[in-house]
Amino acid sequence: MQAVLVILLVSETTQESSVGGQTASLSLHARNILYRILKEVLVGLRVLSKGNFLSEVADLHGISKQTASRVLHEFVDAVNRNIDNIRFQRTQQELAEAKLGFYKRCKIANIVGAVDGTLVPIIAPKDSGEAYICRKGFHAINVMATCSHDRRFIDIVAKWPGSQHDSSVMNTSSLKEHMESERPGMLLADSGYPLTNSLLTPLANPVTPAEARYNNAQSKGRMVIEQSFGILKGRFRCVISILSPYTSSNTDFIVEPYFRIEHSS
């Protein structure tokens, strides 16, 4: 969290206190800007981490509910603009490190990531609401995320209704296109995904000892994405709150900061 504060305070204060192309010294005006941005960061972090109603956060910080809503969106926009840390491995060294990390974890070669989906609750949409009802019976967005061996998220897709199957989300993603065109390695996935040249899934009915060992190793490697989701949801309660303030139109905009802030902590 400290890193998020530093990044946002420096970047936003620099932008607002810059006059005529030169950054003003930390005058009274600059300090006021710094204080306002600090307050906005704290409001944004509280909403995301605690899942509080905006009215409660507004009362806590002495502002109106309308101001709290505006501040939340400004905070989310600032995070998305200033913290660019979710990206697939770009260099051969990064790919090699990921492959070595997964091999140490599960003894399967050529693995560069683990992928899975998670459900983020939303307010029931007025139109096409049934499309957002997930298998657990509530309205949600199906968020697909991929992480590396060190639990760092390297790709997220947060725009599909909760009823959308994991395999369908994958089939329409830029991740699939990247894996098939660039062939950086393979991803570990659960049985909700199809077995392909870039996706390694468990065997449905292992018979031989070798097949059982493979499934066990595959599970060990895939566990990293489940652990990443667990850490994320433990830190940001709004991701799992059935009283989430999200709608189907703003989820992709608001969900991304969770993953960006997690990496900056």
Image (cartoon, rainbow, N blue to C red):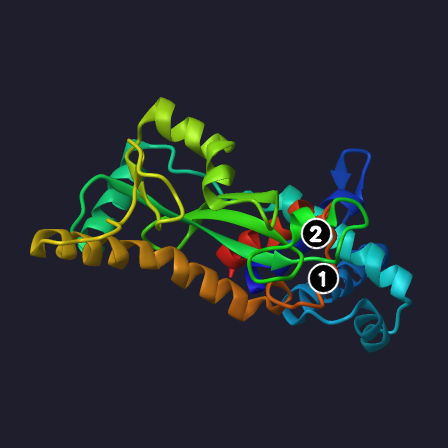
Q: Is residue 110 above or below residue 150?
A: above
Q: Is residue 140 above or below residue 128?
A: below
In this rendered view, identify the residue nearer to me: 263 or 240. Answer: 240
Give the numbered dot on residue 76.
2
Type of amino acid under label 2: Val
Marks 2,1: beta carbons within 8 A: yes
Q: Which quadrant is home to the N terminus?
A: bottom right
**Which residue is found at the position 77% from the left and 33% from the top?**
21
Type of amino acid under label 1: Gly
- Where residue 265 appears, as percent x and y from the top left, is 51, 61
Compared across the picture, whether 53 is left or right of 87 comes to: right
Compared across the picture, whether 68 is left or right of 255 comes to: right
In this rendered view, identify the residue nearer to me: 56 or 115. Answer: 115
Q: CA distance from mark 2 to mark 1?
A: 7 Å
Which type of secondary structure does the marked residue at label 2 adopt?
A: helix
- Where residue 64 appears, as percent x and y from the top left, is 91, 67
Q: Quadrant of residue 90?
A: top left
Q: Quadrant of residue 96?
A: top left
